[in-house]
Image (cartoon, helix red, strand yellow):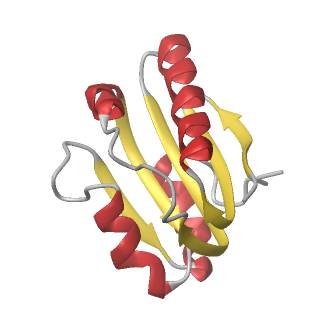
């Protein structure tokens, strides 16, 4: 599954996720996040899920050390299909972490951008 940062604006990083997420790709997201935190001090993330198919079950997902950086993460927004809202929310520990985390449907992408701190009409290319 390709997982690429699409855009950085201020302290906001935008990622596009398609297909099945592998642990190595999550590691890359986290590495990019740490770089953002080191440069900006705080970070916000918008993850666009298109054609998302879940997580590679053969990978080892036990490493949760990135949670030590929660104090530097202000918000996380996801935009994806309704059927992924509960699994994604559980995967990222929504409600268990001190981070504002919201899930938006594709038709609400402008609202998600505004909530995360981008202009609603801002292109994500």
24 versus 40 height, above or below: below
The residue at the point 27 percent across, 44 percent down is: 99
The residue at the point 79 percent across, 54 percent down is: 123
101 versus 44 height, above or below: below
Residue at the extreme top: 38
Does 64 sit left or right of 33 as displayed? left
Residue 22 lies in quadrant: bottom right
Q: How many marks?
A: 0
| Residue 46 visible to an observer of this rendering | yes
Does 72 sit left or right of 6 as displayed? left
Q: Position of residue 31 (x, y in %)?
A: 56, 27
Does 46 sit left or right of 101 as displayed? right
Residue at the extreme left: 96
Image quadrant holding the N terminus, namely bottom right
Q: Position of residue 3 (x, y in %)?
A: 70, 50
Residue at the extreme front: 58
Q: Nearer the viewer, residue 58 or 120?
A: 58
Residue 81 lies in quadrant: bottom right
53 versus 97 height, above or below: below
Q: Position of residue 87 (x, y in %)?
A: 37, 74
| Residue 117 visible to an observer of this rendering | no
Residue 73 lies in quadrant: top left
The residue at the point 46 percent across, 31 percent down is: 43
Residue at the extreme bottom: 83
Q: Position of residue 95 (x, y in %)?
A: 18, 58
116 versus 17 height, above or below: above
């Amino acid at each position: 599954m390709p997982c690429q940062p699409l855009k950085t604006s201020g302290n906001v990083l935008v990622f596009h996720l398609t297909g099945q997420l592998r642990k190595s790709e999550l590691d890359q997201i986290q590495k990019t996040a740490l770089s953002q935190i080191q440069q900006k001090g705080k970070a916000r993330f918008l993850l666009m899920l298109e054609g998302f198919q879940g997580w590679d079950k053969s990978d080892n997902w036990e490493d949760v050390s990135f949670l030590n950086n929660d104090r530097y993460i202000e918000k996380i927004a996801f935009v994806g299909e309704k059927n992924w809202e509960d699994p994604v929310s559980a995967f990222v520990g929504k409600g268990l972490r001190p981070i504002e985390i919201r899930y938006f449907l594709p038709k609400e992408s402008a609202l998600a951008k505004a909530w995360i701190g981008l202009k609603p009409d801002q292109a994500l290319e």
